[in-house]
Amino acid sequence: MLVVGLTGGIGSGKSAASEAFAKLGRPIIDADVVAREVVEPGEEALAKIAEHFGEAVLQDDGHLNRAMLRDIVFQESKHREWLEQLLHPIIRTRIMDKLESYQGQEAYAILASPLLLETDQHKLVDHIIVVDIEEPLQIKRTSERDGNTPDQVERIMAAQLSRAERAANADSLLDNNTTREALEQQVATLDKKLRSLAAEEYQA
């Protein structure tokens, strides 16, 4: 099975691209969903986070206070590094298990991850798709979606790979500077290419 990585910076439209692939019937493994699963109440990772940062990062119902933790880790790089060292191996193992479940059943599966290139997740994929967007539009869309200030968005972007670095690692680029309809048309075209590639390389 061909494993396709899908990534992009915050507000780039990665989720919209994932939804377009899902509409075509392609299986999607969303690393953000996996990342939420591994810090659910009862998970060992959540207990370690509470031990490290204090019980204040937990809500009254025992769930992780994501907004508080996000503020902490983006203000101090050492906190972000500690959290990444804890979570990334756990997330990677879960992703591998999910990919394995599609082996022999699908021509290709998509691993959608904002940190595909920043972590070793890129080693799990055979083809990398980057959703590309101009930075001023990226800031505008993210601010409108999340209610963050432009400064907050720029800090998040600064902690991620640059637009140029992501593009340099792409096997395929999706241009999301215009409409969702235009993005979906590009996805439909790319889907045909990926199915052909899978058939050639893996006899799927």
Image (cartoon, rainbow, N blue to C red):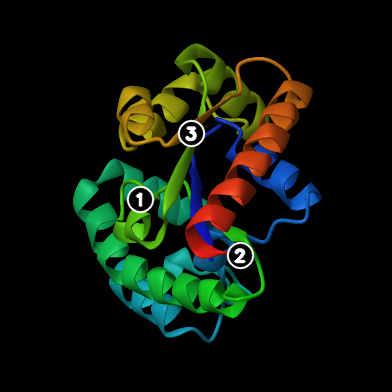
Front-most of 124 and 84? Answer: 124
Dot 3 amino acid type: Ser
Q: Position of residue 133 (x, y in %)?
A: 52, 21
Single out the mark in the foreground, 3 or 1.
Answer: 3
Q: Which quarter of the picture shows residue 169?
A: top left
- Residue under label 1, please give it: 72
Q: Where is residue 182 in the image (x, y as percent from the top left)?
A: 73, 21
Front-most of 120 and 125? Answer: 125
Image quadrant occupied by the N terminus = bottom right
Residue 56, label in figure: none
Whole-angstrom CA distance, mark 3 to mark 1, is 34 Å
Q: Residue at x 23, y 56 (%)?
A: 81
Q: Which residue is drawn at 60% across and 76% down?
A: 104
Reply above or below: 86 against 150: below
Whole-angstrom CA distance, mark 1 to mark 2, is 45 Å
Q: Residues within 10 Å of mark 1 (few under 14, many from 20)?
A: some
Task: Say what secondary structure mark 3 lies in.
Answer: strand
Front-most of 85 and 78? Answer: 85
Dot 2 amino acid type: Ala
Q: Position of residue 134 (x, y in %)?
A: 49, 15
Indicate left or right for 17 with 117 as reference: right
- Residue under label 3, please give it: 172
Whole-angstrom CA distance, mark 3 to mark 2, is 21 Å
Reply above or below: 22 against 48: above
- Residue under label 2, please give it: 204
Reply above or below: 143 against 107: above
Reply above or below: 31 against 86: above
